[in-house]
Image (cartoon, helix red, strand yellow):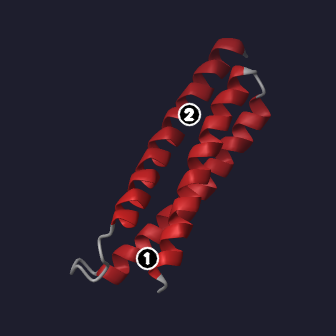
Amino acid sequence: MDFEQTMMELLINAGEARSQAMMAIQFARKREWAAADEALLASSEAAKGAHHIQTQLIGVDEGCGKVPVTLILVHAQDHLMNAMLCRDLAEELVMLRKEMFS
């Protein structure tokens, strides 16, 4: 496993998940429901990609400290957790706006 490449893929997927979630909120503000739904779906797909990478790292580590805990790994994990929270909140905000304005 190329650790540096893996970390970059994790960061890219997590960043995309967060960006798409924020776009969903922006689309909902403009009442562009189809675009908001598409952005939420794209956010979910990117988050799944990041989660898959995270799961691979956990498998490699086997709970034994085989994966070095570097600042970039901590940074990537932080991005992933923020992206997942952002996506969950975006889904709720889009749903609330739909209820209010549809």
Q: Quadrant of residue 64?
A: bottom left
- Between residue 46 and residue 68, name the one nearer to us: 68
Residue 27, given in percent of the width and then of the height, sits at 72, 29
Residue 92, given in percent of the width and then of the height, sits at 53, 29
Task: Residue lying at the far top in this picture: please name it.
Answer: 100
How far is disc 1 from disc 2 in space, using C-alphas? 27 Å
> Is residue 48 visible in the rendered structure shown here?
no
Residue under the image location 66 percent in, 35 percent down: 24
Disc 2 crowd, CA 10 A, few/some/many (<14, 14-19, 20+): many
Task: Residue lying at the far left in this picture: please name it.
Answer: 64
- Between residue 68 and residue 48, name the one nearer to us: 68
Residue under the image location 32 percent in, 69 percent down: 70
70 left or right of 3 in image = left
Q: Quadrant of residue 3?
A: bottom left
Q: Which residue is mark 1?
A: 56
Instruction: Identify the amino acid type marked 1.
Output: Gln
Q: Which residue is mark 2?
A: 90
Task: Residue lying at the far front in this picture: please name it.
Answer: 71
Q: Secondary structure at mark 2?
A: helix
Residue 60, given in percent of the width and then of the height, sits at 36, 83
Residue under the image location 62 percent in, 28 percent down: 94
Above or below: residue 31 compared with residue 71: above
- Between residue 99 and residue 13, name the one nearer to us: 13
Residue 102, given in percent of the width and then of the height, sits at 73, 16
Q: Secondary structure at mark 1?
A: helix
Residues at circles 1 and 2 in contact by the CB criterion of under 8 Å? no
Residue under the image location 29 percent in, 71 percent down: 69
- How many numbered marks are there? 2
Residue 66's label in the rendered image is none
Instruction: Identify the amino acid type marked 2.
Output: Ala
Disc 1 crowd, CA 10 A, few/some/many (<14, 14-19, 20+): some
